[in-house]
Amino acid sequence: MTDIPEPEVTQGIPEPGAAREWLRTMTLIRRFEERAGEMYARAKVGGFLHLSIGEEATIVGSTRALRETDYLVSTYRSHGYALARGTPPEKVMAELFGRVDGCCGGHGGSMHMFDLSRRFMGGYGIVGGNLPIAAGIGLASDYGDTDDVTLCTFGDGASNQGTFGETLNLAALWRLPVVFVVINNQFGMGTSLERHSAVTDLQRKGESLGVPGTRCDGMDVADTHAVLAEAVRRVREDRRPVLVEAVTYRFRGHSMADPEEYRSKEEVAHWRERDPIPAFGEALEREGILDADTRAEIDREATARVDQAVEFAEASPFPAPESLYEDVYVRDEQVHGAYH
Amino acid sequence: MAELRYREALNAALREELRRDERVLLMGEDIGVFGGAFKVTDGLLEEFGERRVRDTPISENTIVGIGVGAAMGGLRPVVELMTINFALLAFDQIVNSAAHIRYMFGGQVSVPLVIRMPQGAGHQLGPTHSHCLEAMFLHVPGLLVAVPSTPADAKGLLKTAIRDENPVIFIEHESLYGIRGEVPEGEEETVAFGHARIAREGSDVTIVGVSRMALTAERAAETLASEHGVEAEVIDPRTLRPLDLETILASVRKTNRCVVVEEGWPHGGVGANLAALIAEHAFDDLDAPVARVSGADVPMPYSKPLEEIAFPHEPQVIEAALATVGKRPATISGGA
């Protein structure tokens, strides 16, 4: 087990408006994920369901380091990223329910959220498959002479995939504006970091590929934001990729189908003591940015919004059978979209 | 019209589209300084510079993935894989990303990406470097698949591929790069997808030839006419997705017989697929079972005499065609 970083939440707390928004968004993700789990247990949600509970600070801390015009690419653990980017919870829940009003019309599901209007360029189901895509989006930004940055998250398990080495090398070689963020939640599914990676200091895994690394405390939204903001600034100005390791822990199993026999309850409890949401809420109270009532209100608002999302998803119809072949192809006079 | 080699026609298509559309860029192994392993991209680095003609490391899956991302970001990338054999390393990005992203993300984004690569046996490169895999790509919804066999089609189809909004698998053939042919001149001379080419008209048997096998079929048809009095109609489908099934069916309804010639393996091949489609749509018009002439159902051997019998040549096509018209006993195609 990686040493738990020391809390430093009093560092880098933003101005009050932003601080409250971060807490609100982390809380929304938490309540959304809990409800998604419940809906899965009630068979409202099918397939796989990978929850971000425990990892909210990595999501909010990293996405809040971006401009609206920057691009975000995530993994199959994708709900929180969509929510953080501003996709309405209704659209995300409806996607989980496989409904026509889901953000991908029910074609993608839990692992494949996407919102072009917010430049959330997707959740990707194949471990490591998203890295080259992020580099390609970075190439398009660079080619278009914009200073947009692409932020690409992936897990510690993905750092062993071929695409990790290939993409970091190419991104460094071509000076692509990509911030690679390895969300080290310390398990590649059920295999612990020290059992799947010879080098456990993941921030160093890019060094031999020309990509410098740094680390943040992924249980601390302020620290995550501070480190990511600096990484994003550096990438935007220098037009070179960097690698950031965000050390975190998922409180739930890899997916809903995970009996969690590979780790002890004590270890999970130990990390839960550093739950990023109460930690940040308490820090904001200490700083006098909000009081206990406001924290409770934020939580009630999040729950109410998730209620609304479930209601919306329930009310949304399933896609019509005749829509089965829609969007396989861009249709024109030579491509009719369905095979003979 | 100008007489060009197949590789020169491809080069002209790339050059014209690079000039026409600033969003077009090329990526691939050795396509720049080296000019392309088969010299298809010769001279393009000099004209368009390193921003638009990019040599890549040997990282096939990532090259394709970067092409996917760049296409999602608004560019029109043309990725060259040195040969189709190396596409096997890129199958995740080709199938899970290029082919499925539009559908998976509810149509919010498209992937206007072209992946060019040559296939083919005949150069004694053994099992790992002699593949003909058009059937594998044909299998995947979301991809378009082009298989040009002439210089004119090579140019016209590549221009169409680059302009299309969908991901296109553009399969060239190593043995065709040097062939010459008349190629229409003019930037807007394109060849539409989904329109088969009737390479030779005939009334006795339809022969569908895929990729290089279109030329093999044409030569076989000449012999069928001159030595056996059999007039074969030769059809080159040009694109397998979209497929111009109508032209093939119309021909079969006229000739009542069909032979499909492909270089790839028999099981789950283009011929198997076409035989099923023809049976579904024109069963009553058939006077003989649809015959398949395919590559042998083996990994490609290195030794020359073995390699020569492991992919189709004119005599096998002639025998299969004669069998369909009752001039030879029928043989069962396919392997083990």
Image (cartoon, rainbow, N blue to C red):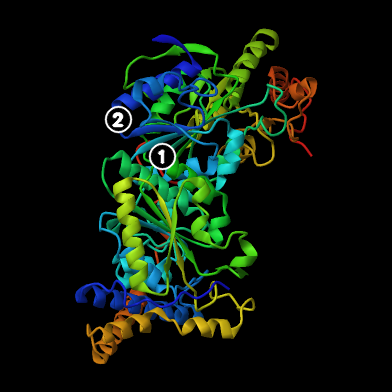
Q: From the viewer's perspective, tell me whether residue B170 is left or right of residue B190.
A: right
What is the quadrant of residue A140 in the picture? top left
Q: Are marks 1 and 2 on the same chain?
A: no
- Amino acid residing under circle 1: Trp
Vertically, is B207 above or below A189? above
Residue B165 pos. (x, y %) = 36, 40
Residue A172 pos. (x, y %) = 43, 44
Q: CA distance from mark 1 to mark 2?
A: 22 Å
Residue B281 or A35: which is nearer the viewer?
A35
User: In this view of the protein, can residue A297 be seen by the observer?
Assistant: yes
Q: From the viewer's perspective, tell me whether residue A173 is left or right of residue A294.
A: right
Q: Residue furthest bottom?
A: A293
Chain of the residue that carries numbered disc 2 in the rendered image? B
Res. B21 mark: 2
Res. A174 mark: 1
Q: Residue at x 52, y 18 (%)?
A: B199
Vertically, is B158 above or below B182? below
Q: Residue at x 61, y 70 (%)?
A: A190
- Amino acid residing under circle 2: Asp
User: In this view of the protein, can residue A99 be seen by the observer?
Assistant: no
